[in-house]
Amino acid sequence: FAVCVLPVLFVTARASEGQVGSSGFGQFAAICCIGLLWLLIAIIVNLIFTFATRGIMLNGEGALTSIGHGYRVSRENLVEIILLALPFVLVYGVIGGIFTVANFLGGFQLAIAEAGTAGITDTNFWGFLIAYLVYALTLIVLGTWQSATFTIGYLQWTRDDPDDLFNFDKLAPTLRP
């Protein structure tokens, strides 16, 4: 909140005093505020969606009631969810950083070696493609692990009986009109 409000208040105060020649900084601050607000909304919706889909699949809830269920699970277990998500955020950041650095250094070295050629070379293209495939496969494995971890966490947060944690007999397929 302070990241959004303080720059706007600063620019508004300076503009009212006539000290700001253009509103470029104000526009930048407004765009940053909108971007941060959009990010916050996306995180909240993603959090609710994560547990709403598990409510549909594992508890047999309806689509609209699962949204309330996802919100309730998210609100009641927010600290545990944050602690469960932190290692994944760190691992995603490290993998993304490694991929970015590897592509930057690889592209920089190829650009120096092929300074006389114009455009993208086949070596650049295939090197990037192989690096991207390794990156994508790593994210697929990590995404599967993350989904399984959050599903087990969801089951622990929503099931009363620990012996009933992996009992899915009540999820027999039923047709609903």
Image (spheres, rainbow, N blue to C red):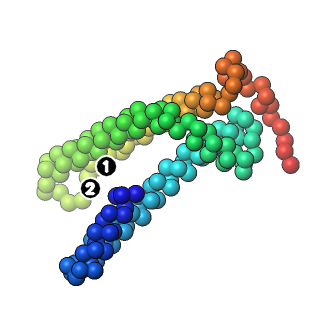
Residue 37, quarter of picture: bottom left
Q: Is residue 12 visible?
A: yes
Q: Residue at x 49, y 49 (%)?
A: 43
Residue picked out by circle 2? 120
The residue closer to the viewer here, 71 or 89, is: 71
Q: Earlier in the sequence, mark 2 or mark 1?
A: 2
- Give percent across and percent down for residue 104: 24, 47
Amino acid beneath label 2: Ile
Q: Say which element carries label 2.
A: loop
The residue closer to the viewer here, 125 or 173, is: 173
The residue closer to the viewer here, 82 or 109, is: 82
Spatial CA distance of label 2 from label 1 is: 7 Å
State whether residue 73 is above or below residue 17: above
- Give percent across and percent down for residue 148: 56, 30
| Left/right of residue 121 with respect to residue 144 in the rendered view | left
Q: Residue at x 32, y 37 (%)?
A: 94
Contact, mark 2 vs mark 1 (Cβ under 8 Å): yes
Residue picked out by circle 1? 125
